[in-house]
Amino acid sequence: MDLKRLRYFVTVARSGSFTRAAEVLGMAQPPLSQRIQELEAEVGSPLLNRDARPLQLTTAGRLLYEQAVQILQRTDAMMASMRRLLTDQRPVFNLGMVPANFHGNLAGIIREYRRALPGVEIRILEMNSLEQADALREGRIDAGISRVEIPAPGVRRIVLREEPMVAALPFDHPLARLEEAMPLGALKDEPFIVYTSNPRPSLADHVLAQFTERDIRLSHIVEVGQYDTALIMIAAGEGVSIVPASARLVASAGVAYRPLVEHITSPIVLCHREDDDTPELQTFYLVVSEFLAEQRVYIHGEWCQREPGA
């Protein structure tokens, strides 16, 4: 089976249109359509429902698409390995990361990874959970870390840890002076700030669900687009929020963090291609797992991140 035809087919399937796929591939539409027809003749079944807008895969098309993506990924990985071998190029491990949601852990993890594999260069690309899934299937990243479990074909997701969440308050807020853990309901009448990121679902949906599950009605929800913006607004006294406990590893002037009575957690999710068994990925998994295990300490009745220098 011609790999070029498979690549054309995958591009059409992802684009949902012959016109857009032709633009991506830099070719005219008629020869692209002809290559897909040749592939359908070889398979012996229609692969696309051409009457649908956007184009939809048939049952045979979905099966071929899933297999084609894996074949192309392995082919691209093989060619990349050959290029590194022939050019003596330094191996690169590309990591997708949800912006701001992993906080102070990342620097330590990168340091440990470089110590374990000094000959491998690690690159960080900011992308949300859905973008990570696409980037993995396309071979643009080797692994991703996010806060949301979103199933995707060909992608394996591992929950590395359920991290406790804490209240984030202005430093001069009355609740910030409490030494004991506070109930989630204490925040219901405060302007509650959530940092949303598209596409959804995001960590914001997980946070809001904690109130809904406990029948706590927030009186005023304020949505912002970035985590840094949320911290600025909290420091300015414009509202409160709940965040992963590791947020305390990053200094935020004007923001106080307090434990909650309720056991609320946020998952730390590692994702990678199902067929990836490279030493670089295996080493990264071990480094992240060991690092997170070492950082856990028991504070105020809950497992939290170890403070810097502790």
Image (tube, rainbow, N blue to C red):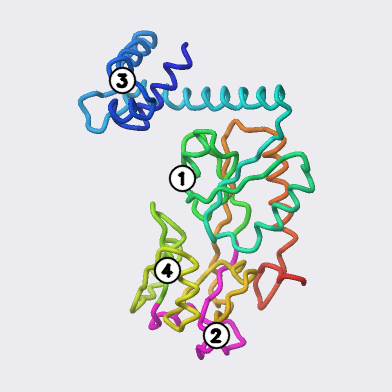
The tag earlier along the polypeptide, 1 or 4, is: 1
Name the front one of labels 2 and 3.
Answer: 3
Mark 4 = which residue? 194
Per the image, label 1 sits on a secondary structure element best described as helix
The tag earlier along the polypeptide, 1 or 2, is: 1
Q: How crowded is mark 2: few (under 14 residues within 10 Å), some or many (20 or more)?
A: some
Circle 3: residue type: Ala
34 above or below 101? above
Does the magenta-highlighted stretch encompass residue 160? Answer: no
Which image quarter is the C terminus in? bottom right
Between residue 204 and residue 27, name the one nearer to us: 27
The tag earlier along the polypeptide, 2 or 3, is: 3
Circle 1: residue type: Glu
Image location (x, y in percent) of residue 115:
79, 48
Q: Work out how far the residue at label 1 is from the one at label 2, CA to CA, in angstroms.
A: 35 Å
Q: Work out how far the residue at label 4 is from the one at label 2, CA to CA, in angstroms.
A: 18 Å
> Residue drawn at (45%, 67%), measured in percent from left and top?
210
> Residue drawn at (66%, 78%), measured in percent from left and top?
300
Q: Which numbered circle lies on residue 171?
A: 2
142 above or below 211? above
Write down the quadrant of residue 255 in the picture: bottom right
Q: Which numbered circle lies on residue 131?
A: 1
Name the front one of labels 4 and 3.
Answer: 3
Write down the quadrant of residue 81 in the picture: top right
